[in-house]
Amino acid sequence: MMKNKYIKCTIAIVAMMQIFVSCKKDFLELTPRGTALEDNFYKNETEVMQGVISVYDVMQWGTTGGYTMKMPLLSAASDDNWAGGSNASDQPNWVAYDNFNMDPRIGPQGGLWNKNFSGINRANLILSKIEGATTLSAPFKARVTAEAKFLRAYFYFDLVRWFGRVPLITAVLPTAELYTQKQSTPAQIYAQIEKDLREAYPNLPATISSAEKGRISQGAAKAQLGKVLLYQNDNTKLAEAITLFEDVNKVGNAYGFSLVPVYADIFNPANKFNSESILEIPHSNNAAWGDWGWINGGEGNVGTQFIGMDSYNGDTYSSGWGFCPVTLDLVNVMKTDPRFDATIIDGAALKAGGATYNARYQNTDYFIKKYAPLKAFRSASGVAEQNWPINEIEIRLADTYLMQAEALVKANQNPTRAKELLDAVRGRVGLASIPATLDNIYNERRLELATEGHRFFDLVRTGTAVTVLGPVGFRANKSELLPIPQTEIDITKGIITQNPGYN
């Protein structure tokens, strides 16, 4: 029974040196699929594009070193959701993050470290191949270089937020240097992220064709850079962030972004890459995957399976595994909000209508709706649990509206524009105008983006994590970061050192 399945792997920096050419994305299927020797590959634009796709592919991964799907895992770490599952031993890494009882060997850190460094290594490798290629057209070379730099920045942004000090690697490492990489400071990591994104966005297209949905646009890169600047809590970076967000958010922007009129439609799997979506990770059942030993080889979203109601029997939804039940705290703050019905499934109401499901660990009878398993989208090929074709929207326009409003208030700039942005988010769901204060903006972020994986890092960066999460185990100057995987410390013979509080 897959609810208790553990996927184990060795998580050393050496794992970063692997790259696969058999990776897939909706915007390009590889023909023929397979592998090729690296030295004989990347000789033309088709082969280089396959290498770029292999970097994109890592964004989909959710089962490296255990189940570490980004969106539900971060929701479980926040006050939006509990860990759930069959019991506290079902996924102990999730439970440890839920109650901030991680140690160097228990917690989600191994999979997250391995995933992101795998993506970085792939980006470094394809950048080296692009640089050495002599048959690429100038426009093609500029675009794929920009994509690889964006993706390297994307993976490092996750690493610096989760771990703080990590090795900064921007080239393919010789074997002799694999275990000698020291950690860089967060400031050094952020400087590289900013550099990559600033170099990337001028060479990315404003819009993405229907055949290439899932590739990065200039607007996505600008939004990501604005987010990176805002999240550093450095007021000297606010002016640039505001300019970037305004370019993305203004009416008639060059990227085609606009708020979806009906809130629930944002999360309809039939409405992929809608006008509100800025950065979206595609998933499909095209691979008809069925290998539990290497779920990352498929294209499906196993996170959807995780959050569904266990053994559910009723209308609309398909059965899941009962992870991430919604906290009563979130239910109580949202129960009078117009976004409640699009955000949270009321299990008790379903039971009253004749449905059944199993109450699992930390059950509250409330479940995530935004990315829930829907019968209409259950795969008829491969193993259905591995093949949910439900995308993850990582950045959307309402998020950038609220980030710009926050930056404007912090910078003491243009209060009229800040209020306009906040009011637009609220007005979409029929809520009245309110003052654009930081407290109101932060509260709006929780309600608007609930269960989408933003809340934990919002609490950390705004300095409210101890107040909100302290009662469930969060400790200042420790729980903001995950422990460094013990395997990395061991294999480097202590060159990589542990984060504070985990020794």
Image (cartoon, rainbow, N blue to C red):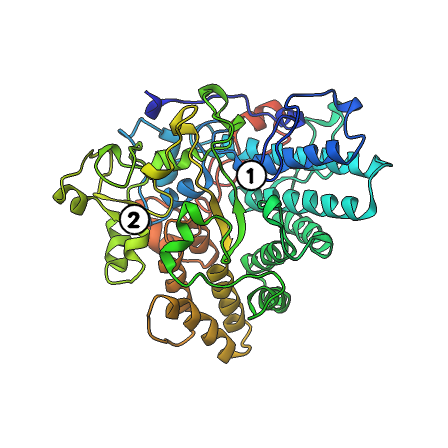
- Give above or below for 338 relative to 366: below
Which residue appears at 58% of the width and 69% of the height?
Answer: 252
Which residue appears at 51% of the width and 76% of the height?
Answer: 417
x, y percent for residue 337: 28, 62
Q: Is residue 122 left or right of residue 329?
A: right
Density class for disc 1 (Cα within 10 Å; few <14, some 14-19, many ≥20) is: some
Badge number at residue 26: none
x, y percent for residue 195: 71, 52
> What residue would you read off at disc 2?
471
Q: Nearer the viewer, residue 413 or 42?
A: 42
Density class for disc 2 (Cα within 10 Å; few <14, some 14-19, many ≥20) is: few
> What residue would you read off at disc 1?
59
Find the distance from the CA under tag 1 to the CA under tag 2.
33 Å
Report which quarter residue 241 is drawn in: bottom right
Report which quarter residue 306 is drawn in: top left
- In this orientation, does residue 386 appear? yes
Q: Nearer the viewer, residue 149 or 162?
A: 149
x, y percent for residue 158: 55, 44
- Give above or below for 481 relative to 292: below
Helix, strand or loop at label 2? It is helix
Q: Give the amino acid type for the residue marked by disc 2 in the picture.
A: Pro
Mark 1 vs mark 2: which is more N-terminal?
1
Q: Nearer the viewer, residue 38 or 27?
A: 27
Q: Is residue 246 left or right of residue 308?
A: right
Helix, strand or loop at label 1? It is helix
Q: Give the amino acid type for the residue marked by disc 1 in the picture.
A: Met
- In this orientation, does residue 503 appear? no
